[in-house]
Amino acid sequence: MKTLLITRDIAAPVVAQARALFDVTVHAGGALDGATAAQAMRDYDAILPTLGDDFSAEVFDGDLRCKMLGNFGVGYNHIDVAAARDAGVTVSNTPDVLTDATADIGLTLILATARRAGEGERMVRSGEWGGFGPKNLLGTHVTGKTVGIIGMGRIGQAIAHRCHFGFGMEVVFFNRSPKSVEMPAQQVDTLAEAMAADFVVVTTPGGAETTKLIDATAIAAMKSNGIFVNISRGEVVDEAALIDALERGAIAGAGLDVYENEPAVPARLRALENCVLLPHLGSATAETRQAMGQMALDNIIAWTRGEIPQQAVN
């Protein structure tokens, strides 16, 4: 029986199925650092890792027992896929199953930031709310505004669909390649054009090609009343530049589900009232997380049968 390391506790039905097929270890110590990941590569036949586990290039040096990483998550920038390929290690991910849940979080952040829901909730909980007032916590309308989507993949299109058909929003998008979509949406030629929308939602994949794509110059293209939302990866945004813009009032607000060095969130960001900050909830529904675990396990099972996993990325 092959050995399988699951680096974080996942849905019980998935773990039960894994135990019926593999000699399973569920790691209970949080994210794997590089040294722990390297040792795991020598100790197990397959690993089911997730975001935060450090599978950088050095982890793939030497004589490796593990030849399969069935990643839990659509993003896999915590895995050096090129180094894995060179070491003969197959890597897979879990696309599609989290599209709707993540798009829903994008809309949650648009609405919560526009309507200052975070501030209002804190006011009520603190006992500082003094009752209705005509000018209390005035936010901004969402219906009928323009949304600029950065990265028009599955999640970007799901957000565009919700924004246009649910809120009558005009959709513009910036994508690195030409993209035809099944809804009214205009692809613009430059990042700056998309950043100039009333709401900006970043859904581009992480990785070296998009690191700090949203830099100070991109943020400067936003309207002073613009609202910025990031549900992609924290490193896609120059966090210091975003904080500076928020502190100066150069933009109206931000809704964030991901951070550059998560789980660390800068104190300057946490101190800002014009932000809604979520703890990476994009795929956090019970149904979605079970589906992600099942897909990751299915990819590993396919590998044990000598098949190419359906969601292989290398």
Image (cartoon, helix red, strand yellow):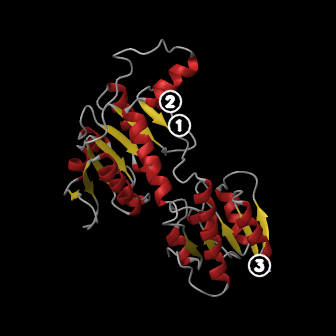
- Which residue position is annotated with label 2? 270
Q: Is residue 246 left or right of residue 101?
A: left
- Which residue position is annotated with label 1? 265
Could you tell which of marks 3 and 1 lies nearer the N-terminus? 3
Q: What residue sits 63% from the left and 64% below the top? A: 293
Q: Amino acid at mark 2?
A: Arg
Residue 150 location in percent, x, y? Answer: 32, 53
Distance, label 3 to label 1, CA atoms, is 39 Å
Distance, label 1 to label 2, CA atoms, is 7 Å
Q: What residue sits 58% from the left and 53% below the top? A: 285
Residue 232 shows in the view: no
Residue 136 location in percent, x, y? Answer: 38, 18
- Which residue position is annotated with label 3? 2
Q: Amino acid at mark 3?
A: Lys
Could you tell which of marks 1 and 2 lies nearer the N-terminus? 1
Residue 278 location in percent, x, y? Answer: 52, 40
Question: Looking at this view, is 14 or 305 the one in front?
Answer: 14
Say which element carries label 2. Answer: helix
Could you tell which of marks 3 and 2 lies nearer the N-terminus? 3
Considering only vertical position in the picture, is 187 above or below 121? below
Dot 2, how many residues are within 10 Å of its Cα: few (below 14), some (14-19), or many (20+)? few
Q: Are marks 3 and 1 in contact (CB under 8 Å)?
A: no
Q: What residue sits 24% from the left and 57% below the top? A: 185
Q: Are marks 1 and 2 in contact (CB under 8 Å)?
A: yes
Using the image, tell me which numbered label, if any, was put on residue 50.
none
> Residue 301 occupies which quadrant of the picture?
bottom right
